[in-house]
Image: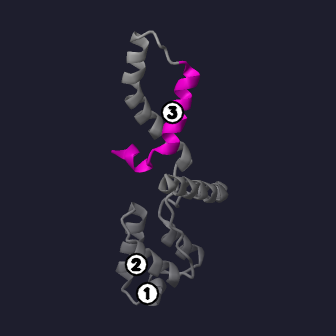
Amino acid sequence: MIKSIFARQSRMHLDERFQQLGPFISFAPPVRGWIKAIREGLGMSTVQLAKRLRIKQPSVVALEQSEAKGTIELATLRRVAEALDCTVVYALVPNRPLEATIRDRARILARRQLEPIEHSMLLEDQKVTSKDAEARLDEFVRETNPRLFWE
């Protein structure tokens, strides 16, 4: 129970942090990649960047291409960013709040588990009201370890 409370607080804290990102999360990379765009924006040639990175010029072209394809390694991107006097900002940003994802997943699981019970109650002429069903779902969400929602 304490673990689930801590997990919920952690999710809510993350959701708040993601909300603070606001419109910044909509930054799509340039078609040819950030490295090339920033290098060109600085007026720097591939030869000049190669010297700063202590690599050969064709390797810079390969780095720019691998970044544009999405295959560049994070450590390499950080090294190039440093040579361009930039900072790599890396984040996994959920498409919607984590708390909403957990609630929806829990509701799916709860419905699966409660459906046979509600069916047997209906057969015994003890129909569960939608208000009762919602209360049970909410209780299930609160008291169930979120790790169980993903099995």
Which stretch is magenta? 129-151
Q: Quadrant of residue 10?
A: bottom right
Q: Please state which of residues 85 and 127 is positioned toward the viewer in this rendering.
A: 127
The amino acid type, in three-letter code, at marker 1 is: Leu
Check disc 3 and give the amino acid type. Answer: Leu
Report, in whole angstroms, how far the alpha carbon at label 1 lies from the one at label 2: 9 Å
Against 38, residue 29 (above or below) is above
Q: Is residue 87 above or below residue 30?
A: below
Q: Are marks 3 and 2 in contact (CB under 8 Å)?
A: no
Residue corresponding to mark 3: 137
Distance, label 3 to label 2, CA atoms, is 55 Å
Q: Nearer the viewer, residue 144 or 96?
A: 144
Which badge, 1 or 3, is on the more N-terminal residue? Answer: 1
Residue at the extreme left: 151
- Looking at the rendered structure, which numbered label has been put on residue 53? 1
Q: Amino acid at mark 2?
A: Val
The quarter in which the C terminus is drawn is top left
Q: Residue at x 48, y 86 (%)?
A: 48
